[in-house]
Image (cartoon, helix red, strand yellow):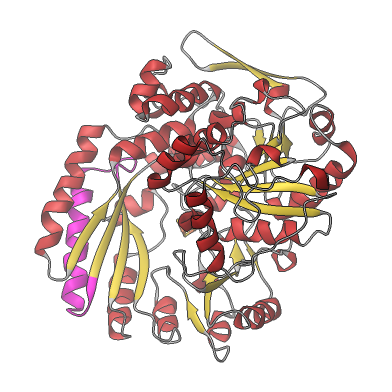
């Protein structure tokens, strides 16, 4: 705990950077300011910019949850905007928290909420900017406890495990109260590490070691300090009990001035490429009554309420929710189907909706088990445009297992068919490169070769602008491959992230670290191979996933 006399005044902080922080704070409603003295001080860090981090409901919710505890003070920190890094370097300013301007290294706990693998290099950058040694093994009891939470922690924390003292394998709203009880009695490293493993779902990477065979695969994992061989993923049984809501309303986010409500967690559809179905299992719904109460609470802060969940059209009382008076509800993504089109008429003033066919042919949609038909897509599109939607955003992927150029041609054909059923509005395609994810049946699969991915993207980019009102955006394949490396990587990949502090370029960093990326992303694996994330007990057997993988390929 931080003593009052230890309080940092923020004198070492550049005035320009402090003014920027003050500007952001001045735009916020709901910021919590507490005296740090005698409390457990947590710096909650989002490893991307303020704009991105404050758009994340999980991050916002954990801020509120921690600050609801009387003996905890939680302040936020983010990756500085690119333009501010020079000022940090020039003034030798250490990264500081928004609320009190204290350097992160003065906190008891620095907790990262990590939602995207491509933010891993930012974790290293933030620790460096905070003058906190990067590797857990280089830190001692004088340093803050550095914790990883968020979805990346619970499907494969191994590529960044060297940087963290503790990883939360599971939903933080389930695990945090128990962990803080431990902090109240156990103090600092190393004592707290040894005691924390008694909490189910807590992973202390330094208590495990890994050996590798000649071919570079994991040959064995060992554990010490009485830690379990498998760490069980934790989840909150009843999400109606969850305290995760928007804590701070601001215009400086993606969801400007919007109060977000989580209606569902976990997805019943289990598409084969998507990790959400497995890592958030089982699918859970918030009680309608609780949603009404949260809406009322949200309306005291703003008129805009956003509903969050993986397949909201499956929520049984969705129409009743959208009919709650006085609310401008927003659902940005819907599942193709007549039920979704019906909902649009209830979303007043809504201009843009996304649906995700993911693939152009019925065949490929069957491979990935995306259970929507071409008829669903065409009917829904027609109804959406007829219902007044101005922009229909369509999500597709290239490089999916078994995909051929005919499947890519069919994406173009599908957009033409949508245009033929409705000449109204705009169609925006968003095309991503397929990245295999842990705990999906495709965890054994390889990524498609870069030349082929580029060729397939080129086919789409060439054809779509020729269709009236249609345009296309796509990801940069180079970063999809980086995501693949971080998603399927093992502990050795941390050296790549470390080297990126110097080079910035992940491929050069991999070369400098002696890591062959092809081993991780361009190789089909055998069932018998020990995968880096096998130590996590996700609640789904490898045999079942393998059977599904074989079925998909056949
Ligand atoms: S892709 Fe969408 S519908 Fe399919 S499992 Fe993931 S969240 Fe559910």
Q: Is residue 308 visible?
A: no
Q: Is residue 286 left or right of residue 379?
A: right
- In terms of image quadrants, where is residue 227? top right
| Residue at screen point 57% across, 82% down | 321
- Residue 92 x/y as whole percent: 51, 35
Position of residue 199 relative to residue 297, above or below, is: above
Q: Position of residue 201 (x, y in %)?
A: 73, 41
Please tell me in which quadrant of the rendered image residue 373 appears. bottom left
- The single residue placed furthest to the top in the displayed view is 214
Q: Is residue 76 visible?
A: yes
Q: Position of residue 240 (x, y in %)?
A: 72, 69
* Residue lying at the far right of the rendered structure: 185
Q: How many marks?
A: 0
Q: Nearer the viewer, residue 369 or 187?
A: 187
For the residue pair 308 and 90, the one nearer the viewer reads as 90
> What residue sits 54% from the left and 52% below the top?
18
Using residue 252 as the reference point, say whether residue 147 is left or right of it. Answer: right
Specify start and end residues of the magenta stretch as a single range.
Answer: 398-426
Which residue corresponds to the image point at 39% horizontal and 22% vertical from the top-left? 510
Is residue 342 found inside the magenta-colored segment of the image?
A: no
Q: Is residue 224 above or below residue 200?
A: above
* Extreme residue toward the bottom, this view: 325
Q: Nearer the viewer, residue 49 or 318?
A: 49
The quarter of the image holding the N terminus is top right
Q: Quadrant of residue 220?
A: top right
Q: Position of residue 511 (x, y in %)?
A: 36, 18
Horizontal relation, residue 415 to residue 294: left or right: left
Against 79, residue 35 (above or below) is below
Quarter of the picture containing the C terminus is: top left
Q: Residue lying farthest left?
A: 466
């Amino acid at each position: 705990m931080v003593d009052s006399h230890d309080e940092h005044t923020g004198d070492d902080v550049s005035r320009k950077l402090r003014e920027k922080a003050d500007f952001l704070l001045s735009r916020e409603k709901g910021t919590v300011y507490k005296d740090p003295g005698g409390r457990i001080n947590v710096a909650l860090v989002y490893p991307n910019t303020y704009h991105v981090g404050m758009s994340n409901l999980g991050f916002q919710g954990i801020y509120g949850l921690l600050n609801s505890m009387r003996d905890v003070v939680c302040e936020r920190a983010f990756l500085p905007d690119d333009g501010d890094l020079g000022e940090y370097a020039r003034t030798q300013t250490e990264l500081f928290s928004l609320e009190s301007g204290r350097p992160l290294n003065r906190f008891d706990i620095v907790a990262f909420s990590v939602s995207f693998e491509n933010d891993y290099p930012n974790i290293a950058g933030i620790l460096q900017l905070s003058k906190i040694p990067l590797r857990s093994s280089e830190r001692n009891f004088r340093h803050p406890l550095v914790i990883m939470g968020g979805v990346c922690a619970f499907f494969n924390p191994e590529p960044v495990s060297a940087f963290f003292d503790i990883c939360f394998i599971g939903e933080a709203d389930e695990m945090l109260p128990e962990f803080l009880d431990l902090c109240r009695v156990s103090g600092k490293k190393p004592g707290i590490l040894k005691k924390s493993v008694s909490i189910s779902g807590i992973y202390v990477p330094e208590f495990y070691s890994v050996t590798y065979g000649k071919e570079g695969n994991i040959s064995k994992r060992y554990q010490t300090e009485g830690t379990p061989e498998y760490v069980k993923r934790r989840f909150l049984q009843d999400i109606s009990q969850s305290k995760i809501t928007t804590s701070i309303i601001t215009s400086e986010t993606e969801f400007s001035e919007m109060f977000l409500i989580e209606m569902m967690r976990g997805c019943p559809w289990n598409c084969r490429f998507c990790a959400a179905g497995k890592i958030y299992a089982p699918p859970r719904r918030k009680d309608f009554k609780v949603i009404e109460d949260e809406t009322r609470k949200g309306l005291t802060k703003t008129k805009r309420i956003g509903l969050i969940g993986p397949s909201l059209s499956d929520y049984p009382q969705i129409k009743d929710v959208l009919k709650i008076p006085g609310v401008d509800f927003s659902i940005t993504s819907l599942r193709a189907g007549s039920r979704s089109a019906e909902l649009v008429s209830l979303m007043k003033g809504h201009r843009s909706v996304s649906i995700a066919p993911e693939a152009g042919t019925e065949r490929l949609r069957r491979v990935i088990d995306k259970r929507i038909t071409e008829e669903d897509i065409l009917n829904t599109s027609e109804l959406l445009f007829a219902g007044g939607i101005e922009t229909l955003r369509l999500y597709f992927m290239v490089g999916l297992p078994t995909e051929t150029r005919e499947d890519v041609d069919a994406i173009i054909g599908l957009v033409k068919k949508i245009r033929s059923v409705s000449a109204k509005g705009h169609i925006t395609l968003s095309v991503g490169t397929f990245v295999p994810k842990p705990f999906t049946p495709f965890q054994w699969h390889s990524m498609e070769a870069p030349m082929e991915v580029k060729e397939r993207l080129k086919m789409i980019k060439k054809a779509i602008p020729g269709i009236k009102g249609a345009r296309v955006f796509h990801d940069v394949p180079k970063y999809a491959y980086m995501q693949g490396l971080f998603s399927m990587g093992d502990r050795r990949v941390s050296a790549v992230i470390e080297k990126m502090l110097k080079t910035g370029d992940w491929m050069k960093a991999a070369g400098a670290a002696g890591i062959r990326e092809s081993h991780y992303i361009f190789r089909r694996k055998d069932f018998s191979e020990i995968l880096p994330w096998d130590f996590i007990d996700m609640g789904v057997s490898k045999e079942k996933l393998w059977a599904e993988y074989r079925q998909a390929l056949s």
